[in-house]
Image (cartoon, rainbow, N blue to C red):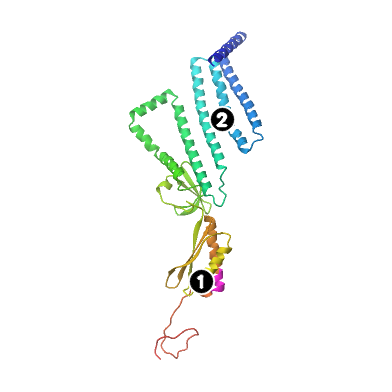
Amino acid sequence: MEEELNQIEQQVAEITTDIEEVLPVLPDWVMPMAVVVAFFLLGLVIFRLVFAVLNRAVAKKDLFWRSLVARTRRPLRLGLVVATLTVGVAVAPLSPEQTDFGQHALLIAFMVLVAWTLHTALHIWTTVHLRKFTLGSEDNFLARKHVTQSRIMVRLAGWVIVIVVTAAILMTFEGVRQWGVSLLAAGGAAGIVVGFAFQPVLKNLIAGIQLAVTQPIRIDDAVIVEGEWGWVEEITGTYVVIKIWDWRRLVVPLSYFIEQPFQNWTRDSSSLIGGVLLYLDHCADIKRLREKTNEVCRNSDLWDGNVCHVQVNDFRERVMEVRILASARNAPRTYDLRCEIREELITWIQREMPEALPRTRETVSVDGSHRQMPPGIEVVGGRH
């Protein structure tokens, strides 16, 4: 490889000498610049040829392979340009300082290329992995688990890649490297200040790792946070977006779900039991009410066939509290089922059992048994 580079360098030097003899008025920087530009254009030409070949190769493949080639277009172009420029800087008639500068710039470009390639590979892997799962299905528990883990880990890995590559680039500069060594050697107040400054970022970073591993929440989970009911719409590297039932968005830091209590209605499965409370008169026929409730559940497309119970939950002075429990496949269907049960039962009670509606009873005591009283009023006590 070194012999080939030396031969190319000698040929470029001979061509440069011949051109300088023909055009002695050209500045010194023209030939080195021309060589670098020529190799840059050569890299672009090679990229076009390689990319055309790849496009033709995947033209009859499925969507994944076509998407893979499309996603790697820019990293491939940068890689081929960096490769050709590396040869160009090595053979160009540059001064030692210019050669060092060019090699340093190409080293930084190579680090950016590595980060870009890793980031693209993460997205491709995520796409391939998540093609097996569908969030739109009724029982999407497994899909929500994998989507949540994949998205959180990809975002965290992306942050790690950016931090590591940025640190590597900064360490290629002599001044920054010396500053870093001095900071590590000092190991005192400066490090503590930096640690406190980045505490919120590190806190959310660690919380993100915990969320990905333990998964107290997942994408599309039904949760109650800060008294608001909604779905987990998005999980980023620093916060979670809750889509509230009225389409508002509640943005909560990642660390909240590690440190604060909250309700998750779909933690283990999507099925939920909903409750309906009715306040009826004490003379209500519970047996008929139970039969009607079972009929409503059986005729409803929202009921999952598991739970449908009617219980007298409590007695009060004027009414009794009847609780109805019914289950459905997910939170929205459970809410709609509760509303449907309320509507069907109140209509049936008004029509078939109006005596079950709450009533107020009064007992009137009067003096004198011969006083005329309205019909329906019984005279108790008093003098005869």
x then y, percent, for residue 275: 49, 62
Q: Across the whole image, how many numbered discs are drawn on residues? A: 2
Where 16 falls versus 211 (above or below)?
above
Residue closest to the far top: 21
- Which residue, given by chain and number where applicable, does mark 2 sit on? 75
x then y, percent, for residue 188: 33, 32
Q: Secondary structure at mark 1?
A: helix
Three-letter amino acid code at the position of disc 2: Pro
Q: Disc 1 vs disc 2: which is toward the camera?
A: 1
- Mark 2 is surrounded, within 10 Å at the Cα level, by few (under 14), some (14 to 19) or many (20 or more) other residues, namely some
x then y, percent, for residue 179: 39, 26
Question: Cα distance, mark 1 to mark 2?
Answer: 72 Å
Identify the residue at image location x=45%, y=28%: 168
Magenta-drawn stretch contains 351: yes
Tell me if residue 345 can be seen.
no
Where 83 falls versus 280 (above or below)?
above
Magenta-drawn stretch contains 178: no
- Which residue, given by chain and number where applicable, does mark 1 sit on? 287
Three-letter amino acid code at the position of disc 1: Lys
| Extent of the magenta region | 347-353
First of labels 1, 2 by sequence position: 2
Q: Nearer the viewer, residue 285 or 306?
A: 306
Quadrant location of the C terminus in the rendered image: bottom left
Helix, strand or loop: magenta stretch: helix
Q: Secondary structure at mark 2?
A: helix
x then y, percent, for residue 282: 46, 74
